[in-house]
Every structure is written in structure tokens, then in C-alpha cells.
Image (cartoon, rainbow, N blue to C red):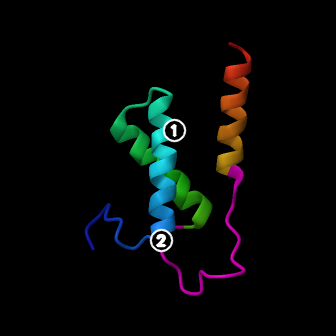
Amino acid sequence: MAKGSKGTYTGKQKRLAEHIAEGYEKRGTGKKTAKARAWATVNKSTKGGKNSGSGRGKTTSKASSRKGGRKGAKSSKSR
């Protein structure tokens, strides 16, 4: 598999990365940077691509999304 290939990710992870990238782009980040940051966030929260036994019972870390939400709220509150 080529470096940077997203073939080993689940559909849910791909949709999540798209949604996160849209949020970054809305905040003024460039398209390429937004995509890279989105995948970094997905990797951090889901621990990478498809893992064996990644069905029920596996928790995902929501620390990154909580941090982003707090940052956004703080910046909008200050406006």
C-alpha cells in the first residue's frame, strides 16, 4: 500500500475525517493542511486504520474533539 493511502480505513473514519477537514476549512485553514490535520485527529482518536476486533466494546478517545470544541467556543465567546 502506498504511503498516505487511506484504503485501510473504515467508512466511518473517512466520513469523520471529511467532517473535521470541513471544520478546519471554515476556520480559514488551507485545504491541504486541513486534510492533514483531520487525518491526524482521526488517527489519534481511533488509533489508526482497521484493527482486528474493532467492533463493539472498543472505545475511542474524544480528547481531540473536546479540545477543538473548547477552543472554538473560547474564540467565539471573545468576539
Region in magenta: 48-63
Q: Position of residue 4 (x, y in %)?
A: 32, 60
What amino acid does circle 1 point to? Gly
Residue 41, above or below 52: above
Quarter of the image for residue 14 reads bottom left
Q: Residues within 10 Å of mark 2 (few under 14, many from 20)?
A: some
Query: Horizontal placement of 27 versus 4: left or right?
Result: right
Q: Is residue 47 above or below residue 57?
A: above
Q: Give the alpha-carbon distance from disc 2 to disc 1, as whole Å.
A: 22 Å
**For mark 2, what is the residue?**
49
User: In the displayed structure, would residue 57 be above or below residue 25?
Assistant: below
- Is 9 located above or below residue 67 in the figure? below
Query: Which numbered disc flags the more N-terminal residue, 2 or 1?
Result: 1
Residue at 66% x, 30% y is 72
Residue 68: percent from left, percent from top: 65, 39
Q: Is residue 66 left or right of residue 24?
A: right
Does the segment drawn in magenta span residue 14? no
- Residue hosting label 1: 23
